[in-house]
Image (cartoon, rainbow, N blue to C red):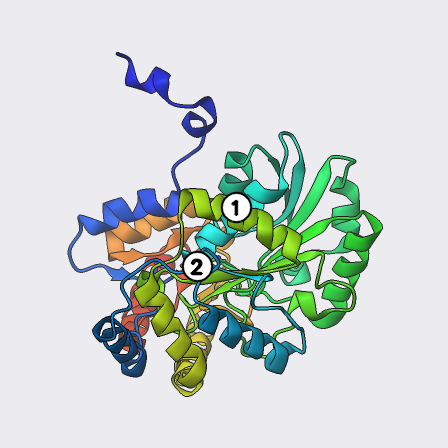
């Protein structure tokens, strides 16, 4: 049997994630300082881990409702009411998922018919395009640029919207640029969504990781709650990547459709992790704020360090990534990343992994210790000297 012939053409045509490929190489090397993975270096705060242990002791070992534990949904509803003044009914407007990753997949599969288009500002998280494609849709990249602080504008979107456009998929604060969208610009996107009757999928997984004022929740904008599928989770803000808990918030019809797929393909998110997520929301804010303050110190260190080497560097306002331009070296972003790894043993991610307009940049994650960051800056500085 020719195994390759038996793979679905959609999957066969899909490139493997640029990040994964790169980190397979890194895994084989010794002495590497990695600014590669978008994963907190903190361990989940102890009180959250402990609540999981107690949960097991109390016998939380069975399936939950397909929607997730009602207690967790109630905590999420409370959070959004208090933080963003937007109301969700925990019984039918909140779905607990296996990370934002699953929520994203469910959202796309629930709304897309073959050939329908989704506008996606780039550079963006590597899964966005793939999720749209796997759901039978067509991703339509919308390039953003440093000159406009990597924000997407309505003028750009107007040029690419067609009668087939079904949705707009945004992720701010942004991975990989650290860009945010201030409220007036989000309001302009909201008006665009109404004009073209689009669904907005807003991935706000980095919403708590903002360093320059408050994050605006897209669903909290007037008229946007029911049009928006809001995605969020615990991986980044609470250092809970391995627990695999996320959630989707929207009107009962969208959440109901997503839950239908979820019940046949996943049943429910892991109960132990749901118990821990309740504790994170009830008592985790202080530890979360402490981690965010630490990321902010590291952000300043990286910004200053990269700029002082002469690299053009956009100031990230959220998430835990910084996205310097490496155009002055004359190398492509992949060449830069490969040569830096071979010569100085620093791992970062080529900007091209996040879309064509990411070419000429590299993504550095500062979710690693200050000590590692100082060492990485020293090595990057030695590396780029030869191009100056
Ligand atoms: N969305 C964005 C923008 C991300 O950067 C990531 C992970 O890096 C995810 C979603 C996936 O998060 P989760 O761990 O909740 O699946």
Q: Where is residue 337 in the image (x, y as percent from the top left)?
A: 36, 50
Q: Which residue lies furthest to the right in this view?
A: 195
- Whether residue 289 appears in this view of the structure is no
Measured as percent of width and height from the top left, residue 14 is found at 45, 32
Mark identifier at residue 247: none
The answer to which image quadrant residue 222 occupies is bottom right
Badge 1 vs badge 2, beta-carbon distance below 8 Å: no
Answer with left or right where residue 315 lies relative to residue 72: right
- Specify whether tag 1 is near ligand 1 (CB below 8 Å): no
Q: Label 1 crowding class (10 Å Cα cut-off): few <14, some 14-19, many 20+?
A: some
Depth check, front residue: 211 or 237: 237
Q: Is residue 174 visible?
A: yes
Image quadrant holding the C terminus, namely bottom left
Residue that label 1 marks: 260
Mark 2 near ligand 1 (CB under 8 Å)? no
Check disc 2 and report its element: helix, strand or loop.
loop
User: Residue 181 sits in which quadrant?
Assistant: bottom right
- The one nearer the camera, 355 or 202, is 202
* Gap in angstroms between the C-alphas marked 1 and 2: 12 Å
Q: Is residue 195 above or below residue 48?
A: above
Return the disc, 1 or 2, that comes first in the chain's sequence: 2
Q: Residue furthest top?
A: 1
Residue in front for this viewpoint, 362 or 288: 288
| Residue bearing the label numbered 2 | 65
Q: Residue at x 67, y 54 (%)?
A: 200
Query: Residue 273: x percent and y percent?
Result: 33, 66
Q: Is residue 148 left or right of residue 291?
A: right
């Amino acid at each position: 049997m020719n195994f390759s012939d038996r793979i679905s053409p959609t999957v066969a045509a899909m490139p493997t994630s640029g990040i994964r490929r790169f980190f397979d190489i890194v895994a084989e090397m010794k002495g590497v300082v990695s600014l590669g993975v978008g994963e907190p270096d903190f361990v989940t705060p102890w009180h959250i881990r402990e609540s999981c242990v107690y949960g097991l002791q109390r016998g939380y070992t069975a399936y939950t409702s397909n929607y997730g534990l009602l207690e967790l949904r109630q905590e999420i509803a409370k959070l959004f009411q208090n933080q963003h003044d937007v109301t969700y009914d925990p019984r039918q407007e909140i779905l607990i998922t296996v990370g934002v990753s699953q929520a994203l997949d469910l959202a796309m599969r629930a709304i897309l018919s073959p050939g329908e288009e989704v506008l996606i500002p780039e550079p963006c998280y590597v899964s966005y395009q793939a999720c749209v494609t796997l759901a039978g849709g067509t991703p339509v990249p919308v390039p953003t640029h440093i000159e406009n602080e990597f924000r997407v504008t309505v003028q750009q979107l107007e040029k690419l919207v067609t009668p087939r456009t079904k949705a707009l998929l945004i992720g701010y604060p942004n991975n990989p640029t650290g860009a945010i969208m201030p409220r007036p610009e989000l309001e302009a996107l909201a008006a665009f969504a109404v004009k073209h009757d689009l669904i907005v999928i807003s991935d706000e997984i980095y919403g708590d990781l903002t360093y320059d004022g408050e994050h605006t929740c897209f669903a909290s904008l007037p008229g946007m709650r029911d049009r928006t599928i809001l995605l969020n989770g615990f991986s980044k803000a609470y250092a809970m990547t391995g627990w695999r808990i996320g959630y989707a918030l929207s009107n009962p019809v969208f959440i109901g459709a997503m839950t239908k797929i979820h019940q046949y393909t996943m049943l429910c998110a892991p109960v132990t992790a749901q118990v821990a997520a309740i504790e994170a929301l009830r008592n985790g804010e202080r530890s979360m704020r402490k981690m965010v303050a630490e990321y902010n110190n590291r952000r300043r260190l990286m910004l200053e360090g990269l700029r002082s080497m002469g690299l053009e560097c956009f100031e990230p306002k959220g998430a835990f990534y910084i996205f310097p331009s490496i155009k002055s070296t004359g190398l492509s972003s992949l060449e830069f990343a490969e040569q830096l790894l071979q010569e100085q043993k620093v791992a970062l991610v080529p900007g091209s992994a996040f879309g064509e307009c990411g070419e000429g940049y590299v993504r550095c994650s500062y979710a690693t210790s200050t000590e590692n960051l100082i060492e990485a800056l020293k090595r990057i500085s030695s590396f780029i000297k030869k191009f100056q």
